[in-house]
Image (cartoon, rainbow, N blue to C red):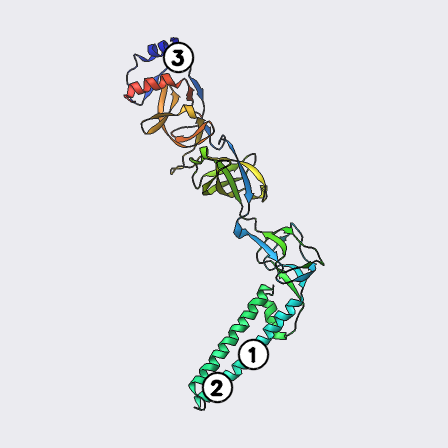
């Protein structure tokens, strides 16, 4: 009753003043139970911690496997090594390679015979000695032999032969019973999965090579927070100078944890994280179109009136209701933008009296 009486006495004679100024003297703030706090920038106080995992994008990872059953003769790289594209990784010995090379050389020989026959039949057809149909059959046979050569060359590439290896085989006709596997992309050897002398079946993995120039954070976001997510929104790894931006917001909800997946691409601090590492991250306030600074304030400091949100800012002579935009929530805090600065003092307790006086002045609800 005493509080209500003081509120009535202080505001009963307040006239409506332009600018929504609510006159309150310094000595009256304590009587009304008003507590003040400065807004914190969202980067300094971005809210609750969320669990995240560092992952490698699918296009950044390569598994080098054995193309044919083979024995490992030598290994040229170790785990942790940085490799360039086409750099030798391992040398394999395999009897199956001999068969593939023989098939390729035989296809080349058959193509050469088909070419000679085609040239001869073209001349005979021009002299009218053979029918046009025979020339067409010879042309079709030549096309089939060309196709077979291409197929055999593709089989060699699948087995690990480079274009240079195939060209040398075509030039020299010399068979080799070993092949050197090379990296198809630059990156880091994250894992070596075989030993020298080991006999492996076709398809057995040898190396895992990754390009770490791009990494993702897969973040588990509670449904209570998901409503404030936006693509492009910034995230920061706790206690590290690692930041990123939300690229994707998942649609499926994990029934056990009631969370959904958000994926962020790391933009700074790549050297401070490792694939597979579990981290804690914070969601930073989503930027507005005008790129205004976002602040974190206690949720109860934000007053809803009509379709807009306001906070009460301490100014000379009282308080001013300033319109803000709520961009999201993080725990007990609201993330807001508006005509604010870090030096402002915002009322976060004792708002009932201020709201009653302000709505009475403006005729609000």
- Direction from residue 361 to residue 165 in the image, left or right: right
Where is residue 224 shown, x and y percent of the image?
Answer: 45, 32
Q: Tell me where residue 333 appears, x and y as whole percent.
A: 45, 28
What is the distance, in whole Å, between disc 2 and disc 3 at their CAs?
111 Å
Element at badge 2?
helix
Residue on which disc 1 sits = 110
Please, what secondary structure does the residue beneath circle 1 have? helix
Classify 54 as above or below 146: above
Q: Position of residue 4 (x, y in %)?
A: 36, 11
Residue closer to the observer: 284 or 105: 105
Residue 201 in sight here: yes
Query: Which of labels 3 and 1 is toward the front?
Result: 1
Left or right placement of residue 17 versus residue 150 in this view: left
Measured Cα–Cα span from mark 2 to mark 1: 16 Å
Residue at 44% from the left image edge and 20% from the top image edge? 36
Residue 28 is tagged as 3
Disc assigned to residue 121: 2
Of callouts 2 and 3, the N-terminal one: 3
Between the residue at mark 3 and the residue at mark 1, the CA separation in whole angstroms equals 103 Å
Picture disc at residue 149 = none
Circles 2 and 3 in contact, beta carbons < 8 Å:
no
For marks 3 and 1, the one nearer the N-term is 3
Q: Is residue 198 left or right of residue 155?
A: right
């Amino acid at each position: 009753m005493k509080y209500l009486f003081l509120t009535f006495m202080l505001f009963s004679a307040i006239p409506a003043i332009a600018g929504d100024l609510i006159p309150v003297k310094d000595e009256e703030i304590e009587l009304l139970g008003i507590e003040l706090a400065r807004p914190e920038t969202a980067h300094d106080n971005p809210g609750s911690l969320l669990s995240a995992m560092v992952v490698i994008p699918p296009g950044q990872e390569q598994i080098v496997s054995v193309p044919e059953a083979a024995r490992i003769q030598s290994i040229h790289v170790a785990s942790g090594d940085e490799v360039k594209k086409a750099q030798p990784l391992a040398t394999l010995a395999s009897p199956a390679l001999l068969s593939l090379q023989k098939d390729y050389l035989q296809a080349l020989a058959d193509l050469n015979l088909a070419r000679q026959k085609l040239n001869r039949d073209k001349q005979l057809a021009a002299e009218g000695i053979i029918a046009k149909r025979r020339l067409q059959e010879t042309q079709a046979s030549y096309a089939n032999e060309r196709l077979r050569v291409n197929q055999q060359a593709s089989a060699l590439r699948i087995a690990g032969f480079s274009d240079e290896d195939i060209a040398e085989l075509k030039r020299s006709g010399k068979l080799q019973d070993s092949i050197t596997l090379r990296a198809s992309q630059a990156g880091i050897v994250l894992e070596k999965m075989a030993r020298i002398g080991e006999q492996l079946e076709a398809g057995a993995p040898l190396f895992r090579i990754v390009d770490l120039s791009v990494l993702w954070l897969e973040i588990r976001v509670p449904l209570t927070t998901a409503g404030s997510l936006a693509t492009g929104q910034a995230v920061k790894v706790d206690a590290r100078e690692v930041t990123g931006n939300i690229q994707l917001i998942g649609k499926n909800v994990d029934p056990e944890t009631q969370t959904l997946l958000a994926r962020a691409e790391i933009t700074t601090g790549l050297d401070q994280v490792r694939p597979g590492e579990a981290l804690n991250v914070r969601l930073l306030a989503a930027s507005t179109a005008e790129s205004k600074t976002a602040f974190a304030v206690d949720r109860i400091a934000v007053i809803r009136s009509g379709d807009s949100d306001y906070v009460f800012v301490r100014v000379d002579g009282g308080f001013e209701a300033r319109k803000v935009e709520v961009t999201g929530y993080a725990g007990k805090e609201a993330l807001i933008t508006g005509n604010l600065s870090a030096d402002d003092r915002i009322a976060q307790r004792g708002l009932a009296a201020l709201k009653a006086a302000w709505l009475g002045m403006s005729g609000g609800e």
